[in-house]
Image (cartoon, helix red, strand yellow):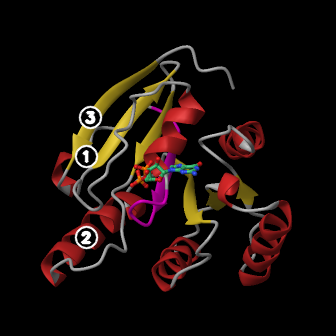
Amino acid sequence: MKVTSATFLAAAGDPRHLPRPHGPEIAFAGRSNVGKSSLLNRLVGQHKLARVSKTPGRTQQINFFVLNGALVFVDLPGYGFARVPPAVKARWRHLVESYLTGRHTVRAVVVLIDSRRGLQPDDRQLLDFLHGHDISPIVVATKADKLTRSEQAKQLAALRAAGRFEPCMVSAHTGSGIDQLWTVIERHLRS
Ligand code: GDP
């Protein structure tokens, strides 16, 4: 898809503040530092749409961006960071689960996995949650440029073996896999 415009729509730190649906939504989720902001920026072709952060876990809000006036990308707060009080984790869960269960406009959730780490228990928990609520996951391994070709193949095979999904592998730095990911996103928008 060619993105001709991308604008910030809203941020919500509380389920009561979610914006009214504006169009079909593709949400993005992953452990903090997985490369979510970098990937969003690369998909949209803007350097500063989502903020690339050096401070994991700082933002606990959902950010909404409108693409081409029609499609909405939803940036869910990162999870899995260490040394976070249980109350903050509970707040994250409440916010994200409220969004995902109450939103008929969500077409798919892009679940980002760091290529070097593979699927972690909290990624699996999210995938189980999506499965339980009939929400399609798009599993994407990030930072492909950090792996050799044979390591990439091994990681893709491990992800394939772990679930019922066909994973993509991308690098926000080199742009590899971005066109394929757009194709998968567009397929979910049509279905
Ligand atoms: P977020 O916390 O998930 O939003 O992750 P960021 O996009 O802020 O990225 C976290 C760190 O990973 C930053 O230092 C990025 O430069 C780095 N990073 C993100 N994507 C890539 C990638 O494709 N390749 C490499 N080598 N580093 C990446």
Q: Where is residue 176 shown, x and y percent of the image?
A: 74, 42
Specify start and end residues of the magenta stretch as a single range: 23-34
Find disc 3 in the rendering and name its residue.
10
Find disc 2 in the rendering and name its residue.
94
Q: Answer yes or no: do the residues labelled 2 and 3 have beta carbons within 8 Å?
A: no
Label 2, label 3: how far apart the Cα atoms are = 18 Å
In-front residue for pair 11/121: 121
Q: Answer yes or no: do the residues labelled 2 and 1 have beta carbons within 8 Å?
A: no
Circle 1: element type: loop
Circle 2: element type: helix
In-front residue for pair 156/99: 156
- Residue 73 can be seen in this image: yes
In the rendered structure, the answer to whether residue 145 lies left or right of residue 72 reads: right
Q: Amino acid at mark 3?
A: Ala
Q: Is residue 15 above or below residue 132?
A: above
The residue under the point 66% across, 40% down is 189
Q: Nearer the viewer, mark 3 or mark 1?
A: 3
Find disc 1 in the rendering and name its residue.
18
Mark carried by residue 85: none
Q: Amino acid at mark 1?
A: Leu
* Quadrant (top left/top right/bottom left/bottom right) for the N terminus: top right
Q: Is residue 141 above or below residue 93?
A: above
Circle 3: element type: strand
Find out whether residue 134 is within the magenta segment.
no
Query: Which of the marked residues, 3 or 1, is nearer the chain's N terminus?
Result: 3
